[in-house]
């Protein structure tokens, strides 16, 4: 049995689609955007996506919050995670549906890595 040109091209297309899917999953897991360093409450992104990690660049004296919200002054119930007042990189793996609002603690400097959509 001999494969037709159409069969060969369909197989090739399916391979490319599969490889593209793996690449997209890797980008989402690793994060495609890192914010600038934030020192006051800031709306980083509006929409859905995946919060990969955050970095505390300056520890400050109190903890901060990263929230799932589209605008500043999010409700406490919108918190995705607390930001410790310890310098370091923290993996989160959080899905967000409204956006990312970063509210640093007193004296904190934070940036976040995320993937939109």
Image (tube, helix red, strand yellow):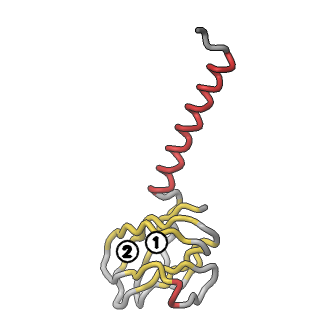
Q: Which residue is depicted at the point 51% across and 90% down?
A: 76
Work out which quarter of the rendered image holds the C terminus and state it.
bottom right
Q: Which residue is mark 1?
A: 111
Compare residues 2 and 54 and report the one nearer the observer: 2
CA gap, disc 2 and disc 1: 8 Å
- Are circles 2 and 1 on residues that touch, CB within 8 Å? yes
Provide the residue designation for mark 2: 57
Q: Position of residue 15 (x, y in %)?
A: 55, 31
Instruction: Please tell me whether mark 1 sits on a helix, a strand or a loop.
Output: strand
Q: Position of residue 1 (x, y in %)?
A: 58, 9
Q: Where is residue 112 drawn, in percent x and y?
A: 47, 69
Q: Is residue 23 above or below residue 41?
A: above
Which of marks 1 and 2 precedes in the sequence? 2
Q: Nearer the viewer, residue 81 or 18?
A: 18
Q: Is residue 37 above or below residue 49?
A: below
Q: Residue furthest top?
A: 1
Numbered disc 2: secondary structure: strand
At x 48%, y 58%, the residue is: 31
> Is 41 drawn above or below residue 57 in the view shown?
below
Most foreground residue, 6 or 49: 6
In the image, 58 versus 15, the foreground residue is 15
Number of residues whose C-alpha sits closer than 10 Å to that of mark 2, classed few (under 14), some (14–19) or many (20 or more): some
Q: Position of residue 82 (x, y in %)?
A: 40, 82
């Amino acid at each position: 049995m001999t494969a037709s040109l159409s069969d060969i091209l369909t197989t090739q297309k399916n391979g490319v689609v599969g490889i593209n899917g793996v690449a997209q999953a890797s980008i989402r897991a690793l994060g495609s955007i890192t914010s600038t360093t934030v020192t006051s409450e800031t709306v980083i992104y509006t929409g859905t996506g995946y919060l990969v990690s955050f970095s505390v660049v300056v520890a400050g004296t109190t903890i901060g919050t990263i929230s799932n919200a589209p605008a500043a002054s999010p409700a406490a119930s919108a918190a995705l995670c607390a930001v410790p007042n310890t310098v370091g990189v923290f993996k989160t793996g959080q899905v967000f549906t409204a956006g990312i609002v970063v509210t640093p603690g007193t004296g904190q400097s934070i940036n976040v890595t995320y993937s939109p959509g």
